[in-house]
Amino acid sequence: QARASGASLILVNAVLPHESMPVESGAVPYYDPLRMDRDARLLLENVAREVRDQGIDCATAVRHGFAPDVIAEVVRNAEASRLIVGTHGRRGLKKFVLGSVARQLLDLVDIPVCTIGPRAHHLPADVPGTILHPVSLAGLHESSTALALKLGRQFAARVVLLHVIPPGPATARDPGKAVDDATAELNRLIPAEERASTQVMVRIALNNVVSEVLNVAQEIEAGLLVLGVHAPAHSWLPGTEPAAYKILVSAPCPVVSLRVTPAAEAKQHQPETKHVVLN
């Protein structure tokens, strides 16, 4: 991603405070903050050296504190334009629950957040051939669509705009009209200059949103998903997660999420200069 957008990288590691370290039964863990700091800096510097060997400017940042707070602070201070994190999915009844750090970061930062989940098997060696963007058409979807098209241009990738219409009385009465209206709105979102420079496809489906998006991602072998996230991560209880979060943790490829707000929409028109990577 840094190479495609001509950006620099900052590798970030948060050293947890002493009071947050887990204590095993009957034992007090030995905590050496200086050693942990040194080990983290050596590890990140080794990775940074490999990145620089590829011609990409790369810096490192080791801070003491809780990961979401540390990363959000580095994002603000560096005026970063994208955040890239790894996240752990959950199994069984909790399979749609985000890792706590990624979940908090989606609320703390106003820039696109790229998550690499445990089911992200489609990791392109160079660039994604196809970018899938599920479009909600629920308002403020212009900013996430603009981001998907910009990434398509950067990576010279095909962009598939997908709108899923869930079953309901209005759709049952006139499914043809629902499909036509959605198709017209998706086409409206594609500027003429994008059509000339990027291969953009419009796709409409009548189905459950989560299952349809995941099925289409597998079918077209998407190398990247772009999601607009509306609800704050802390506003829902387990079992009531919005569709975007369920897609995020179960996607077969990396996902770029954008918290869609008026502020985020305005940010999409600013040039990207830096990326932050959480290691």
Image (cartoon, rainbow, N blue to C red):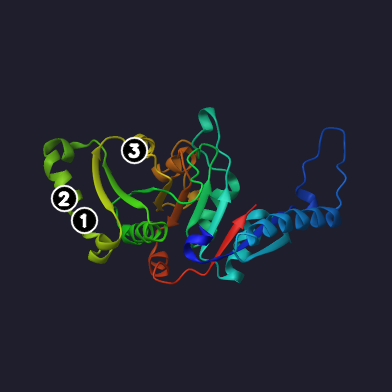
Q: Badge 2 is on which residue?
A: 181
Q: Residue type at mark 3: give it.
A: Val
Q: Say whether residue 269 is left or right of residue 105.
A: left
> Would you identify the image quadrant in which residue 221 lies?
top left
How far apart are the alpha carbons under marks 3 and 2? 21 Å
Q: Say whether residue 86 is left or right of residue 19.
A: left
Seen at 12% across and 45% down, the residue is 177
Q: Say whether residue 173 is left or right of residue 61.
A: left
How far apart are the alpha carbons under marks 1 and 3? 19 Å
Q: Badge 1 is on which residue?
A: 187
Determine crowd level at label 3: few under 14, some 14-19, many 20+ residues with C-alpha closer than 10 A.
some
Give whichever of discs 1 and 2 has the lower sequence position.
Answer: 2
> Would you identify the image quadrant in which residue 191 lies?
bottom left
Seen at 51% across and 33% down, the residue is 95
- In this view, the residue in front, 107 or 228, is 228
How far apart are the alpha carbons under marks 1 and 2? 10 Å
Q: Badge 3 is on which residue?
A: 216
